[in-house]
Amino acid sequence: MSVQRERTFIAVKPDGVARGLVGEIIARFEKKGFVVVGLKQLTPTKELAEAHYAEHKERPFFGGLVSFITSGPVVAICLEGKGVVAAARLMIGVTNPLASAPGTIRGDYAIDVAKNIIHGSDSVESSTRELKLWFADNELLAVATPNPNLYE
Ligand code: IDP
């Protein structure tokens, strides 16, 4: 089965930005061969945060999650590449950083599930929905700058 050209939504959360991990995180994805096709820093509004995490609305941690993600600047990133949605999730690790393998971003840099420094879309459908929420069309490159790892 061939892996398609894909785009995914990544966010360095306020704890990751405050800890100065933005450069390290972007470097990992770039070294892997993925290309940044959208990048901006913003403090999300409550409306954006609630829409982004809508699937968790009924969960007990929802209020805390929304206050946390709106508490400071977030770096929003759109990455492009072959199989980038699943590959970025592998590079990020699992939700609980203590269960994330060393070598993953959460496994190397985080301890607390509520402060796990980074978000990555969990499916192609989620990435489409999330990219529409976080970026205007004209904020994303229509065509990625060629990278030898991007396509054969
Ligand atoms: P994911 O970010 O690994 O995809 P999700 O299950 O979609 O994980 O949860 C979204 C975010 O909500 C997590 O990244 C984490 O910050 C937070 N979260 C998930 N479960 C808990 C919890 O049990 N307590 C506090 N925060 C949680």
Image (cartoon, rainbow, N blue to C red):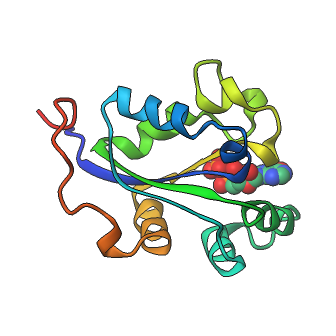
Residue 96 screen position, x and y as percent: 75, 37
Residue 27 screen position, x and y as percent: 44, 31
Tell me: residue 103, above or below residue 149: above
> What residue occupies the far left of the structure in this picture?
152
Nearest the viewer among 140 and 127 is: 140
- Say how many tags the image has: 0
Q: Is residue 73 visible?
A: yes
Question: What residue is drawn where x is 74% and y is 46%?
Answer: 15
Residue 140 screen position, x and y as percent: 31, 64
Q: Is residue 28 left or right of residue 30?
A: right
Question: What residue is drawn where x is 71% and y is 53%?
Answer: 14
Q: Is residue 130 left or right of residue 6?
A: right
Residue 19 screen position, x and y as percent: 72, 38
Tell me: residue 67, above or below residue 11: below
Q: Is residue 61 left or right of residue 46?
A: right
Tell me: residue 32, above or below residue 120: above
Q: Quadrant of the C terminus?
A: top left
Q: Is residue 100 visible?
A: no
Tell me: residue 86, above or below residue 76: above
Question: What residue is drawn where x is 70% and y is 28%?
Answer: 109
> What residue occupies the far bottom of the structure in this picture?
47
Q: Quadrant of the N terminus?
A: top left
